[in-house]
Amino acid sequence: MTDLQTFREETRNWLEANCPPEMRKPGDVCWGGRNPQFSHPDQEIWLERMGDKGWTCPTWPSEYGGGGLSKEENKILQEEMSAIGARSPLGSFGIWMLGPALLEFATEEQKKEHLPGIVKGKYWWCQGYSEPGSGSDLASLSTKAIEDGDNYVINGQKIWTSYADRADKIFCLVRTGPQEPKHDGISFLLIDMDQPGVTTRPITLISGKSPFCETFFDDATAPKKDLVGGLNKGWTVAKRLLEHERTMISNMGLAGGGDGSGSKKMSGLAKVSKQYVGEDADKKIANPSLRSKVAKHEMNSRAFGLTLQRIGEETKVGAPSPAAAMSKYYGTEHNKLRYELLLEAMGSKALGWEGEGFTPEELAITRDWLRTKANSIEGGTSEVQLNVISKRVLGLPD
């Protein structure tokens, strides 16, 4: 038996013994935090066990609380979790965006201070990038951080800050060099949200939900030791983190938010279509036109998953490349199309907004469809991604 075969057997046995029954069913994912909310007692147990194992961040180094797994071992872990329907133990911008940036740019002291807490979901992190006057032109941001002894004093405003009203901490771009060219005067700072100088205000979307917020800093403070990547060197960190964010968003294009490992999970389109449109004598979707669209979407999902896997294997040290812009653009459009097809399959049952006559899933679908429109804005608009692709992938002139 090879080492990987042994690892697979040990992993399968551990998951069977430690994954609680409720966590083997579809459902919400815990985001952790200082005051975590668990929808079921099994969710807390699952997070604790996976956090102790380091498998919330399987490939992170074990000295920072991660699982220390190789890419091959992580692929096996994901396959074995999928085989029993195991739910992800933790959702976190700390895992998807901040952690990888810290691994690349943070000091040893910063890694030891912040990474173990991310692994175990001790803090809910949010991202402070966009501002009312600097969206696509992110480098024109004006939120200032001024030195004051061992601290920075921060003043300014961020917008579209996802879940800022629930977050414990924020990784934030601030201007520390007002005299330098705009890209050269930016720093990357970690700020505690639980202080009098930080306030948030949710932004209600057309879907009725408020995942985004305005965030205000009024003489908020952060210790100098939480400046990552060096003074006025934050743009380098910011660009790398954006690549990680775009990789995260691209995974939304896979059913259930795939892991980029070539997942064979189906999107659920066929099941929903059969439920609302019906089946023919061969147990296929009764509407030939819809059946063709669903089949094409499933094939594209599989191809996209394999492409993400190939990109990950070709990229050195697990860091994303400009190809993240390609993945983000395609994943965004692919996810939006999935919801268009769901609406088409459900017909009039997808038109409910409130009231009787609809199931909870039917009442949610239009809101979820509206939410996908933000995918082509967050993490850099589709237009920005096309510019990145033309310049950094295709090498076209400015």
Image: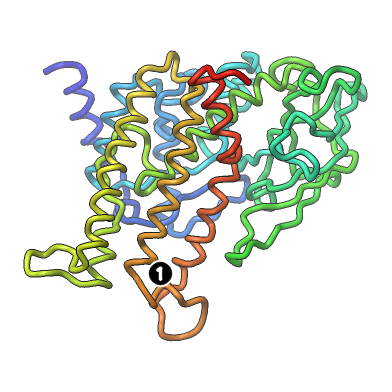
* 350 relative to 330, above or below: below
On the image, the x and y values in percent for residue 315 come to 42, 17
- Residue at 23%, 56% (x, y): give it: 292
Indicate the quadrant containing the C terminus: top left, top right, bottom left or bottom right.
top right
Residue at the extreme left: 281
Residue at the extreme front: 397
On the image, the x and y values in percent for residue 257 come to 40, 45
Q: Is residue 46 visible?
A: no
Q: Nearer the viewer, residue 194 or 359?
A: 359
Question: What residue is disc 1 on?
Answer: 361
Q: Amino acid at mark 1?
A: Glu
Q: Is residue 275 left or right of residue 167?
A: left
Residue at the extreme bottom: 356
For label 1, the crowd category at 10 Å Cα-Cα, with few meaning under 14, some 14 to 19 and many 20 or more, is few
Q: Is residue 295 visible?
A: yes
Q: Nearer the viewer, residue 378 or 83?
A: 378
